[in-house]
Image (cartoon, rainbow, N blue to C red):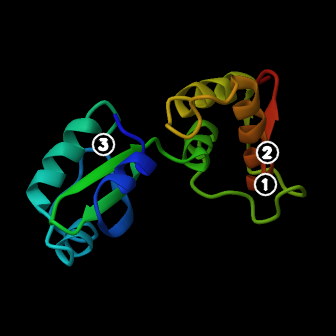
Amino acid sequence: MATLKEILTRRPVAATIRLTVPAGGARPAPPVGPALGQYRLNLMAFCKDFNARTQKYKPDTPMAVTIAAFKDNTFEFVVKSPSVSWYLKKAAGVHSCSSRPGHAVASTVTLKHVYEIAKVKQSDPFCEYMPLESICKSIIGTANTMGIKVVKDLD
């Protein structure tokens, strides 16, 4: 699979489109339809390909996708795994974070949760060469800014 930089250097690009689409839920309706339709891209081809690539994820998992629309009305896209904040909310079992991070704790997660999230994020193209320890530290920092406390074990 080519990186986004390699994709953009091959052919003249009309636009780079960034969307968040539910896994397996790409349809030619908003937000996908209007975003791709204005560049005259084949909506059904994108929807089928995106849904095939994201079928391993649970439905309604928000997937970040970057689409390179070329001037000859073709496209290529890169799908990234869900955001760290989404994973942390799922692991902590909360719908929203603390309104006062650092003062009020919204919930807690264990180091095992952090490690599992880091393993998933390491498969992303921009994290594949980062050590797992660095990704874990980044996730712990994100959890702290969300008001989620990271503990060794749940009591």
- Say which amino acid is labelled 3: Pro
**Amino acid beneath label 2:** Gly
Secondary structure under the numbered disc 2 in the rendered image: helix
The residue lying at 59 percent from left, 31 percent from top is 117
Q: SS of the residue at dot 3? A: loop
Residue drawn where x is 67% and y is 24% of the image = 115
Q: Is residue 151 above or below residue 43?
A: above
Q: Which mark is residue 71?
A: none
Residue 61 visible, this orientation? no
Amino acid type at image mark 1: Thr
Of callouts 2 and 3, the N-terminal one: 3
Q: In this image, 23 relative to 120: left or right?
A: left
Of 14 and 141, nearer the camera is: 14
- With 141 as the anchor, is 17 left or right in this view? left
Residue drawn at x 14%, y 72% as measured from the top left: 40
Residue 13: x %, y % from top left: 31, 66
Label 2 to label 3, Cα distance in Å?
28 Å
| Residue located 58% across and 24% down the image | 119
Between the C-alphas of marks 3 and 1, the distance is 27 Å
Q: Position of residue 12 (x, y in %)?
A: 29, 65
Nearer-N-terminus badge (3/1)? 3
**Decide: marks 1, 2 in contact (CB < 8 A)?**
yes
As measured in the structure, the alpha-carbon distance from the residue carrying label 1 to the one carrying label 2 is 6 Å
Pointer 2: what residue? 141
Describe the element under mark 1 as helix, strand or loop.
helix
| Residue 117, visible in the rendered structure | yes
Task: Count neighbours of disc 1 (C-alpha within 10 A) and say few if under 14, some if 14 to 19, many if 20 or more.
Answer: some
Q: Residue furthest right?
A: 103
Report the quarter where the C terminus lies.
Answer: top right
Location of residue 68 in the rendering, given as x and y in whole percent from the top left corner = 32, 59
Q: Which residue position holds label 1?
A: 145
